[in-house]
Image: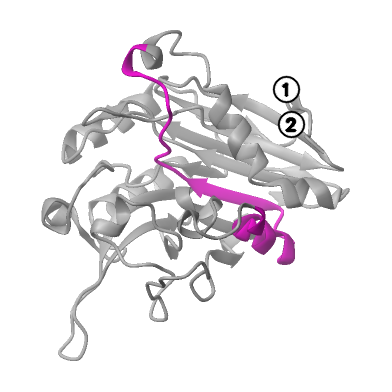
Amino acid sequence: MAVDGEEHKMKIACLQFAPEVGRVQENIRRADQILQNTRIPADLDWLVLPELAFSGYNFHSLEEIKPYLEPTTAGISTQWAIQVAQHYTCHVTIGYPEITASTPSRPSTQYNSTVTISPTGHILNNYRKSFLYYTDETWASEGPGDNAHILSNAASPDQPFYCGTLGALGDVTLGICMDINPYRFTAPWESYEFARTALTHKSPVLCISMAWLCHLTPEELVLNPEQPDIATVAYWVERFQPIVDSKSEKPVFVVLANRCGMEKGVCYAGSSTVIKIQAGVVSLFETCGKSEEKCLVVDLAEMPKFQVRSKR
């Protein structure tokens, strides 16, 4: 596979489904069933699942999520990802609630994380969410690691996000959901921390695992479930404006792997999509519906289906 200015050979799949809080085995069966019903290409490069894919997302306290915390790259989500990566011979990235091992000098710490597995089943990366959402703050610490700290001002944590090589996938920037927003919603809107970081590192591929909410009512969510939530997709596109403004001839691909469904009355936006940004033009390869449970497979070598007009 290759992703550069001239050659874009990568097939990426986003597994969008509706996990339920605390129903881990049922959520795994749900994901397995969708994969079995999908024509997965033999040369798939990367399968991406949502944030906290099997535990569910909407926990209100550390006590509530505690039974579902998984040891660093060693829990049920990682084990599932290893099996699936080896079965499909592809990379797999999945979100999970991480707890580190405690030592005499350091207590265990909880993170909202993703783990990425190679096609041979090796652990390539464990990324910890840098910008926490209100829900995460009830139980998780800020990533990326030992230097993480909670700040009371609008400054971002040290060294946020992951930018670097991810096995045969090459150079990527990883994020989780809130990471693409202004830090704590107190940093200026135009800080664009995630997009600017990716731009600085010249990452050709950005991948964000998500449990993104929407403003739709439960009734609106189930109406035309195969239609994306246009307002959400437009918002996502806007959060990458610095990359659009750079007008670089080298394409940048943005993978947005969201969940769908409802938890405790909270509605999720679904609408997983893969975006191409090139020469100031934003295009969408394809988009899941807002309440659609499916595995969206995108070939970056093909032409995107939809063009989005930049606001600037």
> Residue 71, relative to residue 185: is it above or below?
below
Q: Secondary structure at mark 2?
A: strand
Closer to the camera in the image, 3 or 106 = 106
Q: Is residue 17 magenta?
A: no
Closer to the camera in the image, 57 or 151 = 151
Q: Secondary structure at mark 1?
A: strand
Tell me where the magenta segment starts and ends, as one range. Answer: 190-219
**Dot 2 and dot 1 residues touching (CB under 8 Å):** yes
Q: Is residue 209 magenta?
A: yes
> Residue 292, relative to residue 184: is it above or below?
above
Task: Specify whether 257 is left or right of 141.
Answer: right
> Residue 182, relative to residue 296: is it above or below?
below
In the picture of the structure, the residue carrying the numbered disc 2 is 283
Q: Based on the displayed image, in which of its 4 quarters is residue 203 positioned?
A: bottom right
Q: Residue at x 46, y 8 (%)?
A: 224
In the picture of the structure, the residue carrying the numbered disc 1 is 306
- The quarter of the rendered structure image containing the C terminus is top right
Q: Residue at x 72, y 38 (%)?
A: 276
- Evaluate whether residue 43 shows in this view: no
Closer to the camera in the image, 269 or 29 = 269
